[in-house]
Amino acid sequence: MSEEQAQQMLQQMQMLENMYTELSQKENSIKNIIRDADSAIKSIQEIKANPDSESLVPVGMGTFIKTKHIPNEKIVVNVGAGVAIEKDHDSALSYLESKIKELEVALQETNSQRQQIAANLEQGKQQMQQIMQQSQPQS
């Protein structure tokens, strides 16, 4: 293998390492969003089960306002692109659960891509080791 081919292979491996890192970050982001959605679902279920309970509502910078939930009050749900709509408790729960299912599919796809890249990286490392061994002078 020529030096030029070795350089190309090294560049490909660096590109694969970058892709692996990006996919790992994407996977972590999806996991965080799933955790947030799970937390929202649990909060809505708790409010539905105990309508007279008090809640703390974040208003920014670690500041909260204590409030009581009004029974049959609508929940404002962000549906994307800066759009939020009012939904009843059951509709909000259904929406969040469907989003979690979509995110779990995306997580599986991302994980599969990451594993494929990891396998390609391992194969490339083995090829580079073989090249290094072949290029060393025989004693």
Image (cartoon, helix red, strand yellow):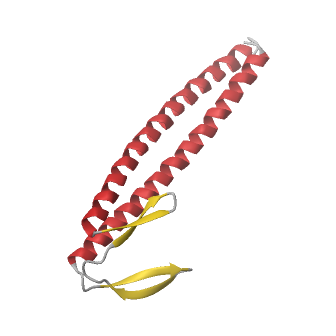
Q: Is residue 116 above or below residue 111?
A: above
- The residue at the point 42 percent across, 81 percent down is 57
In percent of width and height, residue 109 lies at 43, 38
Q: Nearer the viewer, residue 23 or 86?
A: 86
Determine whether 113 is above or below 95 in the image: above
Q: Could you say where residue 89 lies in the image, as x and y percent from the top left?
A: 27, 69
Q: Name the residue: 73% across, 20% down.
A: 6
Which of 131/13 is in front?
A: 13
Q: Tell me what residue is drawn at x 58 percent, y 44 percent.
A: 22
Does residue 75 appear to the left or right of 59 in the view shown?
left
Asked which quadrant contains residue 38, the reply is bottom left
Q: Is residue 16 left or right of residue 81?
A: right
- Indicate the position of residue 138 as horizontal and vertical percent values: 74, 11
Q: Is residue 63 left or right of residue 90?
A: right
Residue furthest left in the image: 49
Quadrant for the N terminus, please.
top right
Quarter of the figure with the C terminus:
top right
Pinpoint residue 66: horizontal percent, then vertical percent. Answer: 40, 88
Q: Is residue 108 left or right of residue 54?
A: right
Point 51% across, 57% down: residue: 81
Q: Is residue 69 positioned above or below 44 on the image?
A: below
Residue 134, picture quadrant = top right
